Amino acid sequence: MNSTPYIKLLKTPLGKYFYDVNKNDVVNISDELYEYLDTHGRNGELSETAAEEMEALKNNGYLSSHRVREIKHHLTDKIEDYLERKCSKLTLQLTQNCNFRCSYCPYSTAEFYTNRSHSSKRMSEEVAIKAIDFYADHSYSKQAVMIAFYGGEPLLEFPLIKKLVAYAEDVFIGKKLSFSITTNGSLLTEEIMSFFEEHNFEAVISIDGSKKVHDRNRKFAATGKGTFDTIVNNIEGLYDAHKDYINNKVLINSVMDPRLPAQEYYSLQDKNEMFRNVSIRRTIVDDFTNTGKHAIDDSFIEENAILAFKALMSMINRYPMEKADSNIIQDELVEKRTADTYVKPRKEVPDTAAPAGACVPGSKLFIDVDGNIHICEKVSETSKAFVLGNIYDGFDYEQIKKLLNIGALTAEKCRNCFAFSLCSICQRFCNAGDELSAAAKTEYCEWSKNYALHVFYNKIFYSELGGMFNKGGEV
C-alpha cells in the first residue's frame, strides 16, 4: 500500500494548499510545509513552527496515507432491495423519429456510428403502460416520482403523452407526481403549453443561442432550413398567456459548438426579453459517440475565459456589473455552489468504497421503444453492456453489479487517485463494443482529474476573495 499522504498539492498567487482525499477538504498551509510535502522531505528538516503545523494537521486527521482497500460500491450487496422499491425516475423513449436533423446529434448522421440512428420506431401504448406499471412496482418507497418523455422528438407523440399522463396520475395517486419533457420546441401550441402547465411539467427546450449559431446546427429534416425563428415565434406567441409557467418551469438547453464564437451562446437573453428570467443550461457539444471529435478552438477557450473573468471581477466590485454578462455571472455562482457541495470535510475514506462518477444503474429508468431498460438516455443503445433487463423479465442484476462497480476495472489507479471522491467518469465512458473496458475508462482519467482540480481551485478562489463579494459596481 502507498505510505505517502493521500493529498494533492495546490497553489495560487495568494497561497499554498493541499486537497486531502481522506478528509475531502482543501487546507491552506505555509510555504515551508508546502515545499516539504512537495519534495517528500528530501530538502531537509522542517522548522519548529512548520513541524508544529504538520503535527496539528495530523492530530486532526489530515495528511493520512489511508487508502481504500477494496473498490466496491456500497450498494453492491443491497442492489436488489434498492431497485425493488427506490427507482426515482422513469424516462420513456416515445419515438426514435425527429423532425429536426441537428449536425451534432448522435442519431442524425452516419458519422455517429456507435449509437442508434433516427428511425420510424415508436413506443406502443401497451409498452408505455407496462413501463409505467414497472416503475410503480419499483418506486413504492418514493414519495416523489417523475416521468419524463424523450425521443427523437416526443411531441410527435402528443396524443400518446396525454393518455400516459392520465394513466400515471391514476397509478400514482397520493404521491407527488411530476412530468418532464425534452423537446425541440417546434411543435409547441396553446393546447400543448396549457397541458404542460396543468399537469406539472418541466419543459426542456433546445435553443443554442443566437439565430446565427442555432441555425447552423439545428435544421428541419424536411427542408434543411434553420429552426430558430419557428421555436422563438412559438414561445413568443405563448408567452403572455403562460408567462409565470415559462419563467419558472421551462429550461433552455444550449449546446455550444466550440467552432463558433462563444459570445453568440450568451446572447439569447440579451436580445430576447422574454428569456431574461428563464433558466439556461449550457454544455459543450457531446461528441462521445462521434468517430471524429470536435476540436475546441483556442479562441473559443480564450473568449470564454475573458467573459468569465469579467463576470468574476464584477462580483468582487472590480469591474462594472452592467458591462459583465449576467448569464455568466449566474454560471459562476453555480460553480461556487458546486465547489461548496462537493468539497465537504469528513472523517476519512472508508476501507471499502467506489470512486464517484458512476450512478446507480436502474435507479433512473430509461425505457426504449421496445421496452428494454438502459441506464439513461446518454449511453449507447446498441451496446449490450448497458442493457439492464426489460420491463417484462425485470432487472439483470449481475449486469447491474458490473456497471455499479466500474471502479474495479482500474482498481489500483482509482485507489491512489486524488480525484477519487470527485471522479466524473460514468459508465458510458467504459464502453468498448458490447463490453466494459479498463482501457476505454482510462482514456478519460485526465479529463476527470482536470474537472476535480477545477472544483478545488473554485473552492480556493472563493475562499481567498470571499470577503470581497458584493453586488458589484464601478472600478
Image: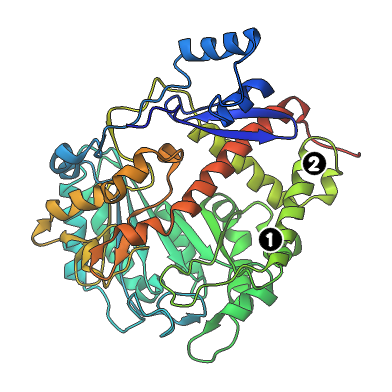
455 lies above or below 463: below
Rendered residue at 87%/38% (across/down): 473
Q: Which residue is mark 2?
A: 313
The amino acid on which the numbered mark 2 sits, given as a three-letter code, is: Met
| Left or right side of 319 for 265 | left
Kind of element beneath mark 2: helix
Q: Residues within 10 Å of mark 1 (few under 14, many from 20)?
A: few
Above-or-below relation of 380 to 202: below
In which quadrant of the rendered view does residue 211 lie? Answer: bottom right
Residue 301's label in the rendered image is 1
Q: Is residue 52 left or right of residue 428?
A: right
Front-lying residue, 298 or 87: 298
Q: Which residue extends farthest bottom?
A: 223
What's the amino acid at mark 1?
Answer: Ile
Asked which quadrant contains residue 350, the reply is top left
Does any portion of residue 114 appear in the rendered image? yes
Contact, mark 2 vs mark 1 (Cβ under 8 Å):
no
Mark 2 neighbour density, 10 Å: few (under 14) some (14–19) many (20 or more): some
